[in-house]
Image: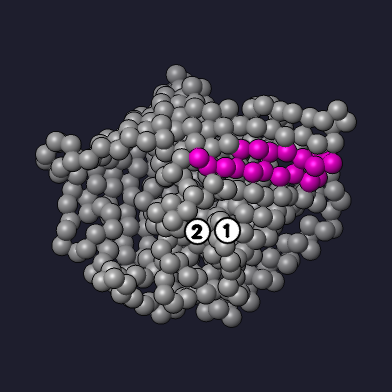
């Protein structure tokens, strides 16, 4: 697997770089917020410039306050547990250096649940620290720690979600952030747009102390046969801008993590032995006149699944597949109704330690007036949820309320 996958992605990555070098530099255009690039339009947030306008920085923040309750069972609505926390509290800095061909963004997290304490044992304050160079309107590159071009829902900012959080499919199978070199190429022909995104990264995840001699290779292709979405609408959930004509995005990708030492590749608990992990992703987004439909498939495999015992607890790479579907409609009053169905199936090798998961969610959102400021209420029915041993299946309801605010 190693020679096949790396042999495919590495020349592919170099091809993208070479194509970009044929274009002349330009002044970067204004952009909406995507975690994979800097935002230097300064139309939102707080902007600061030096007297000569050679350097500039834009400062924004995002805060998500949340309360939730799980019921005892599907039939017993008594509270089994409560959750009240600042789910996310972040500062983001975007800017340019010298001229706008060089840009950067830095994102810091300040809430414990947002710092990966449980898996690493230390606060991971730095989420993103990327420097970009724009070669042309079609091609740019990034260097540093940031989101890999994996599944769509992970690349979508947490501030652009139509539910209080991402799906369980994303939670279990995304490849998250890593340190490396990333390249992005876009082209348009007769109304047809495609985006090519690649990276070579350490494979260890974010905020690590050292790396081994294994790397991660990631590639993603996005096709927009009906043209581009309004203001990058394929990377925020719901049709806030009520697309006047149908817009469609089809995408797929893969990531090969050579000598991974964590149970989910770039994330999860550390394993006693290195393993080679490959992930696959496919997704679709369709929007029109306030309606939005999205579907996402993710899968994780290893060459040879191993189960280790440490302090009588099993350790293994979490392999299997998952499917997430969402449909929504936003009313002219900026109220949105959304429904989500999520299904996760672990591989046979680890089914003695993992249960399948099936979750139905109804969401009600009031945008004030956009994603950065909103009120959200989610009600979910959970069937065989969580990471539990086989035989402990149960069903229950989850009710979650969240207020998000930011600039």
Q: Is residue 315 above or below residue 379?
A: below
Residue found 46% across the figure and 40% down from its top:
111
Of 330 and 103, nearer the camera is 103
Residue found 53% across the figure and 33% down from its top:
62
Question: x and y percent of residue 161 in the render?
Answer: 46, 38
Magenta run includes residue 95: yes
Q: Is residue 227 above or below residue 240?
A: below
Mark 1–mark 2 contact, CB under 8 Å? yes
Would residue 197 be found to the left or right of residue 163 on screen? right
From which residue to which does the magenta span run? 92-110
Q: CA distance from mark 1 to mark 2?
A: 8 Å
Would residue 346 be found to the left or right of residue 205 on screen? left
Question: x and y percent of residue 366 in the render?
Answer: 42, 24
Question: x and y percent of residue 81 in the render?
Answer: 22, 40
Residue found 75% across the figure and 44% down from its top:
103
SS at mark 1?
Answer: strand
Identify the residue under disc 2.
Answer: 175
Mark 1 closeness class: few <14, some 14–19, many ≥20 residues within 10 Å: many
Identify the residue under disc 1.
Answer: 178
Of 292 and 17, nearer the camera is 17
């Amino acid at each position: 697997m190693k020679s096949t996958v790396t042999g495919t992605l590495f020349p592919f990555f170099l091809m993208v770089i070479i194509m970009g070098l044929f274009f002349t530099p330009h002044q970067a255009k204004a952009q909406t917020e995507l975690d994979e690039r800097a935002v230097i339009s300064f139309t939102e947030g707080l902007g600061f410039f030096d007297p000569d306008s050679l350097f500039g920085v834009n400062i924004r923040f995002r805060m998500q306050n949340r309360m939730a309750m799980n019921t005892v069972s599907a039939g017993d609505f008594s509270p089994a547990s409560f959750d009240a926390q600042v789910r996310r509290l972040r500062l983001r800095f975007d800017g340019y250096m010298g001229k706008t061909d060089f840009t950067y963004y830095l994102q810091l997290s300040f809430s414990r649940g947002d710092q990966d304490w449980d898996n690493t044992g230390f606060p991971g304050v730095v989420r993103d620290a990327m420097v970009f160079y724009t070669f042309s309107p079609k091609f740019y590159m990034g260097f540093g720690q940031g989101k890999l071009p994996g599944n769509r829902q992970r690349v979508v900012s947490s501030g652009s979600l139509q539910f209080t959080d991402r799906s369980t499919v994303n939670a279990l199978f995304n490849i998250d952030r890593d340190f490396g070199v990333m390249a992005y190429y876009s082209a348009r022909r007769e109304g047809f747009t495609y985006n090519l995104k690649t990276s070579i990264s350490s494979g260890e995840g974010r905020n690590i102390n050292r790396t081994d001699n294994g790397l991660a290779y990631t590639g993603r292709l996005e096709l927009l046969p009906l043209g581009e979405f309004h203001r990058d609408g394929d990377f925020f959930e719901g049709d806030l801008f009520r697309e006047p004509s149908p817009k469609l995005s089809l995408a797929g990708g893969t990531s090969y993590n050579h000598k991974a030492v964590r149970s989910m590749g770039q994330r999860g608990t550390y394993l006693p032995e290195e393993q080679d992990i490959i992930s696959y992703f496919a997704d679709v987004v369709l929007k029109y006149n306030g309606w939005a439909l999205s579907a996402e498939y993710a899968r994780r495999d290893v060459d040879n699944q191993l189960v280790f015992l440490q302090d009588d607890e099993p350790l293994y790479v979490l392999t299997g597949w998952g499917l997430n579907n969402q449909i929504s409609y936003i009313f002219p009053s900026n109220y949105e109704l959304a429904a989500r169905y999520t299904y996760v199936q672990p591989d046979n090798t680890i089914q003695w330690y993992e249960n399948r998961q099936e979750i139905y969610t109804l969401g009600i959102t009031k945008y004030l007036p956009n994603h950065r400021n909103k009120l959200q209420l989610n009600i979910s029915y959970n069937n065989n949820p969580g990471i539990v041993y086989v035989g402990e299946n149960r069903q229950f309801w989850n009710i979650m309320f969240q207020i998000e605010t930011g600039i």
